[in-house]
Amino acid sequence: MLKKSITVTDNRNGKTYEYPVLRASRGPDVADIRTFYKDTGMFTYDPGFTSTASCESKITFIDGDKGELLYRGIEIENLANEYTYLEVCFLLLKGRLPDKKEALEFDLEIRHRSFVHEGLTNLIGSFPDNAHPMSILSSSVSALASFYYEHLDINNEAEYHEMAMRIIAKIPTLAAFAYRHSLGIPLIYPNISKSFSENFLYMMRAYPHDKLKITSEGELEIKQVEIDALDTIFTLHADHEQNASTTTVRGVASTGAHPYVAISAGISALWGRAHGGANESVIAQLEMIGDVKNIPKFIEKAKDKNDPFRLMGFGHRVYKNFDPRAKVLKKLQDRLKDEMKMDAKLLEIAHEIEQIALNDDYFISRNLYPNIDFYSGVVLYALKIPRNMFTPIFVIGRTVGWIAQWIEFKKDPLSKIARPRQLYTGK
Ligand code: SDX
């Protein structure tokens, strides 16, 4: 009978150490090395945590080799095609999909919690006109900690449910306010007669007298295809295991800080172009390339070790196959291409880059495939979303994942303050 453990031999002195193997329900098992330092006097070394599990979780599972993504055991393609983003929020928070009544109650509660304290509009108003909405968003979410929850009883389900609903409901309002302030135009308040995704587009685009701009085709500016596309985008971004921003949220949770400042820290981490900021960089890069004839030059730059240039929207720490979210977005992009005026030149460059990269040994040998950001940039561009709002839209989708992971951390009896060690090579 094989033992459920591994044995490590220190070849410098022949000593051996045994560590239990903890079984996963899906994906890799883990070697439980919590006593490794006490046993051996050594640290393990894993910058960037390429082989390190930081926690146990039941929320999201990614199979990087197969290109699979499951939220609470349900495949992302199924969720994106069959359920609304708010139903997926319920699933991530509660561990199961809602019935019709629960889905309606959840939706109504989010609508009623979508307003923010007027003090936050003063804070947002204090930013310079050209402030990036991500900077305003991380600051205003941190400020939310001054308005709610002197203390939070994590054992009181009603209390942490309310805490989660407030942040999920208010982030779109703060994001839309940040955008409108960056343009110096009046804020548009939430309209609780509108669904989550429609309301966000409404707050982004409506005019103060509550009428939407009539387009040159004489149509209302918000189309159902846009609402559906944005709802799908929020679902695709909702959670993704222990990525850099979720690890940041858990790290802040581990010190006992306020849940909303943990979310604010997650927003800051997501802004980086190696992470959620990549969607904005993808479009900038496609515009910089400008024409398919310039693609080979940029592919060579991406392959040049001495050149810091990277192909934005390509590669992933976990996916060594197609990102399943990119596949859903690609179908969405094809659908939008017919219904919305897409920038044909940008699309042509994107498709040509994908074809070249998927057939180039440098990318193949490193398993570099298009990730979610490669296509989300193109789809958001087609939805006429301003580029500086691409990453705030990622924030809106991901907030439920961050808060679900925050709650899971707080309820985990094994959770401890995050405090890694180091390989010291100084004087
Ligand atoms: C997101 O973690 C998540 O789950 C994130 C996310 C989520 O939902 O939370 O999925 C969202 O952040 C998606 C990723 C968006 N970022 C980008 O598109 C930026 C471009 N991609 C790279 O910066 C990179 O691929 C990362 C950051 C995504 C992954 O970095 P890793 O896993 O640390 O990989 P690496 O840097 O060690 O690269 C391995 C090799 C290297 O070459 P060698 O040293 O082996 O010769 O691949 C090369 C890298 O130089 N490489 C690239 C490349 N990405 C990796 N070369 C050119 N262009 C690229 N985009």
Image (cartoon, rainbow, N blue to C red):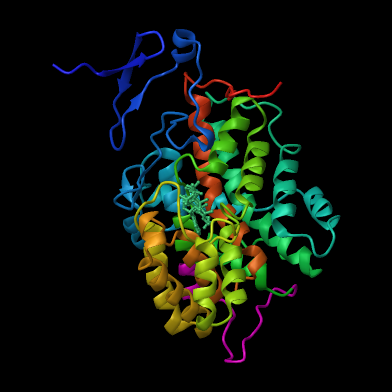
- Secondary structure that dominates the magenta span: loop
Relative image position of residue 34 (x, y in whole percent): 45, 16
In the rendered image, residue 216 lying in the magenta stretch gets the answer: yes
- Residue 229 in the image: state x and y as whole percent: 47, 68
Q: Residue at x 30, y 30 (%)?
A: 24
Say whether residue 196 is visible.
yes
| Position of 4 relative to 58 (above/below) | above
Q: Quadrant of residue 425?
A: top right
Residue 261's spot in the image, x, y percent? 68, 37
At 66% from the left and 68% from the top, the residue drawn is 204
Residue with the most extreme front position: 12
Q: Is residue 415 above or below residue 316?
A: above
Q: Nearer the viewer, residue 223 or 334?
A: 334
Across and down, in percent, residue 182 comes to 77, 65
What residue sits 51% from the left and 22% below the top? 415
Residue at 49% across / 13% down in the picture?
Answer: 37
The stretch in magenta equals: 208-229
Is the N terminus in the top left, top right, bottom left or bottom right quadrant? Answer: top left
